[in-house]
Image: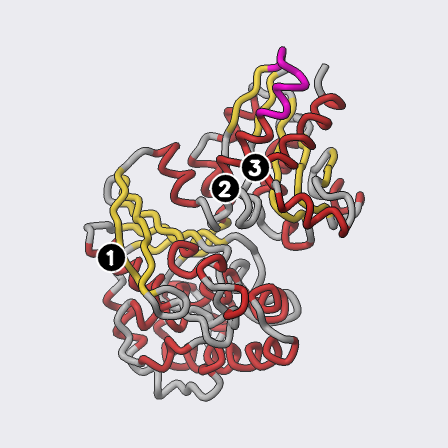
Amino acid sequence: MDVLIAPDSFGTALTAREAADRIAAGWRRAAPHDEVTVCPLSDGGPGFVETLHASLGGSLVAATVAGPLGTPVPAAILLVGDTAYVETAHALGLSLVPPDRRDPTLTSTRGVGELIASAIGAGARRVVVGLGGSSTNDAGAGALVGLGLDLPALAAGGGALAQVTAADLVGLRDLRERLRGVELVVATDVDVPLLGLQGASAGFAPQKGATPEQAQDLERALATFAHAAIDALGDALRPDLLAGPGGGAGRRLLTAPGAGAAGGLGFGLSLLGGRLVPGATLVADAVGLDDRLAATDVVVTGEGRFDWQSLHGKVTTGVAARALAHAVPAVVLAGEVLVGRRELSAAGVTAAYAVAEGPDEVEVALADAGGSLERRAERVARTWSR
């Protein structure tokens, strides 16, 4: 059989490349006669730059930017012609914040703005920003400061946005105008809106360290900031979004799929004219996934946790949808599988297997993430290989 291994990263435990290699090793051990090919993927989150560099080539440029707590962190910019690819996880990844200091009311996206500015300074006329794996929840307010908006209070975290007014954001129009000559593409890891039950605060802030009360406070603060920013831009939004009078453009920004990605960073960059696209789709197209699937008998994808978020623009369901179009079975391997059969079938997933089959096994699996994944892949191969 021809087997394609195309996973995302497994959280902070394994990069996409490491996960692909481990799955391939387990499969080959059980079915040495199969032809196994690895194709690591990304949805815009951790591994975005590494995955694209392996496929597109180009050159890596080192940069130092503000981390989520303000301390300098190293980052990289991938330059391919006049296009720059940057990864927000380099500047504000959850792994950059110690567990005992995780508080999305304080963490800031300022470093992402600095990273985009560095890419433009390196000569890029098109900047593709991969969103995902963030420790922040500030609707991209900090990134605006990193790009030159003279309002330092916006870089103090999402909790500082509750009192922002349209008058405070008077410089937003000028910043948007300065970036007009740069094409800004925002590759989002999830397709959720900014606000609401599945938005940035309610859906994702708790996994970044927020208490239920803080998540509610952040929801209100982000709503205040978002409406103030939309009011500050006014009719500057309409020529780009073709919206009529009555605030139609602003509503579209709030509800756009991906606006809530990376703690609302998708929304913040769309204020500057950024175009939101599914990150998993962008990467899959870049690595030629459809051509690979056309020559494949079965594809194995995966991620750290297969849950409701996976159904909203993640790599696993993106691979499954494309595999379905090619009549190729799609098998998911994940640390945990928290999605029922009905949802799996609707997403085009043929079968899903958990590395940790119960809550008590999660800690054991994490202690040897690579080995656990490899052993599970070996067992799955015995089921699927001819």
Residue bearing the label numbered 3: 7
Q: Given the current orientation, which residue lies at the most extreme top position?
A: 33
The amino acid type found where label 2 is placed reads Thr
Residue bearing the label numbered 1: 118
**Quarter containing the N terminus:** top right
Residue 313, horizontal then vertical, whole percent: 58, 49
State yes or no: residue 30 in magenta. yes
Which of the marked residues, 1 or 2, is nearer the chain's N terminus?
Answer: 2
Q: CA distance from mark 1 to mark 3?
A: 30 Å
Residue 330, horizontal then vertical, whole percent: 67, 32
Going 61% across and 19% down the picture, which residue do you hit?
28
Q: Residues within 10 Å of mark 3 (few under 14, many from 20)?
A: many
- Prevalent SS, magenta region: helix
Q: Which residues are magenta?
A: 25-34
Q: CA distance from mark 1 to mark 2?
A: 25 Å
Going 38% across and 44% down the picture, which residue do you hit?
49
Q: Residues within 10 Å of mark 1 (few under 14, many from 20)?
A: many
The amino acid type found where label 3 is placed reads Pro
Q: Residues within 10 Å of mark 2 (few under 14, many from 20)?
A: many
Q: CA distance from mark 3 to mark 2?
A: 9 Å
